[in-house]
Image (cartoon, rainbow, N blue to C red):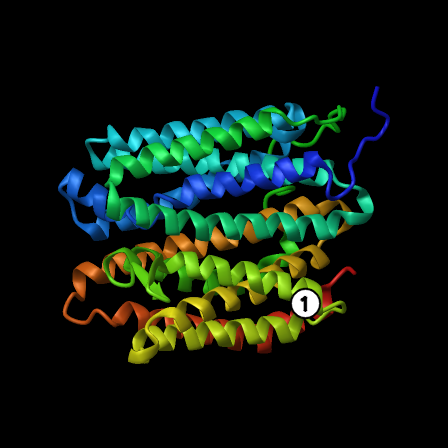
Amino acid sequence: MRKNNTSPLLSLNYLQVCLGNFLLFVARYMLLPVLPSVMANRLGVSLALTGSLFIFLTAGMFIVGPFYSYIVDAYKRKYVCVFSFAFMLLATIACTWVTTTTEFLLLCVLHGMAFGLATTSGITLAIDLTNPNCRSVSNIIFGWTSRLGMMFGIAVGIYLFMLKGFDTVIYVSAAVGGLGILLFWMLYVPFRAPIGTNFCTTDRFLLSRGWVPMLNMILIAFVLGVLIPLVPHTFRCVEVMGIIIPFFAVVGLSFFCSVLFVKLWFKKEHMRELIIVGIVLIIVAIGLLIFPIIYLGLIPAAALLGVGLGLATPEFLLMFVKLSHHCQRGTANTTHLLAWESGISLGVAVTCYLTVHISDSPAVPYRIALVSALLALAFFIFITYPYFMKRRMR
């Protein structure tokens, strides 16, 4: 019989949770670059309309959000994660059967609700399976797997769509998700008695002290959201030493390298400096997409975008954690995720709208992304960081 209620940080259980979360984000984000244009063609409607419906993916997360705490407390967290993950995959596959915009809207809401429950219960599982002394680090590493899964999913989705078409993207997404479900199903999760939380509460949903960095995070995620629908039609791939690689694969690899660099070389806290440098690199990357250096191609833009996100976004998660009370780490992680998803969905919606209504000026979305990044930098320096220093708990 096992006596420990928690596992070391790098235990098999914790690694399973991280890998399962990585696959969850891969399965979801494979669809995002191609779904707006594909559904517009299938439903015979404007790209602006299908793009705007993407906001309902995040709206579903907010609808079910107040009930997160009750659901993961009243029911076994592993099963909540498994079944909501499975429901999200069913909603993904159902995209091939949608025939009206109303059906697509409802599917977006249900997909968002299921994704929200899967991610929240996954965050809770990661915290439960980590030694209490390592939980802040656990949150950061778990957040890394989310961002890496997102980058990898976008790259694979675009690449498969180019080679095999939309239906293949759907089926591969479902297969990847199925593997993720299996990993969560195989977890050993120690029994925890329910604590009797309220049916409707902001616990494990929104961190009240985190609304300022949440706005800042939305501005950063908006930049990436603007790029996601553009890349399949413009910068699909980059060429590295004669090898064709998806644009977002370079972004993801650069992200991974940057977070490893920060972990290995920065032993002390350098939150302010890392976030500022990260946002500045994102600004430079967008500038290179607007005004590319011809002989260098797109490699610098993709690499700088990945490094910038790798420097800034983990530090924002750490900021949310440090703003939270000891028992609110899960809430901090979920708030960071909701900010990220809100920015992404708004960016996708804006790009799809502009693609239809300002087709004579294709650089407009990139300029809007650049403005958002500049605002994010100013907001962080003059508002977010001073607020954080006044309100931080540890």
Counting the numbered discs, the total is: 1
**Residue at the front extreme, as displayed:** 242
Q: Quadrant of the C terminus?
A: bottom right
Q: Quadrant of the N terminus?
A: top right
**Residue at the top extreme, as displayed:** 1
Q: Would you place residue 326 above or below residue 392 in this image?
A: above
Q: Residue at x 15, y 44 (%)?
A: 45
**Where does the image place residue 332, in percent across and percent down from the top left?**
64, 50
The answer to whether residue 242 is visible is yes
Q: Residue at x 31, y 54 (%)?
A: 349
**Where does the image place residue 314, in percent across and percent down from the top left?**
61, 59
Q: Would you place residue 185 above or below residue 61 in this image?
A: above
Badge 1 crowding class, 10 Å Cα cut-off, few under 14, some 14 to 19, many 20 or more, is some
207 or 337: nearer the viewer: 337
Q: Secondary structure at mark 1?
A: helix
Q: Residue 238 is drawn in which quadrant?
A: bottom left
Q: Residue at x 57, y 34 (%)?
A: 67
337 or 288: nearer the viewer: 288
**Where does the image place residue 12, in percent across and percent down from the top left?**
70, 35
Q: Would you place residue 101 above or below residue 352 in this image?
A: above
Q: Residue at x 44, y 34 (%)?
A: 176
85 or 117: nearer the viewer: 85
**Where does the image place residue 95, in percent across and percent down from the top left?**
29, 33
Q: Amino acid at mark 1?
A: Phe
Task: Tell me if 296 is positioned left or right of 360 in this view.
Answer: right
Which residue is identified by label 1?
388
Task: Tell me if 116 is positioned left or right of 325 in this view.
Answer: left
**Residue at the right extreme, as displayed:** 3
The answer to whether residue 338 is visible is no
265 or 42: nearer the viewer: 265
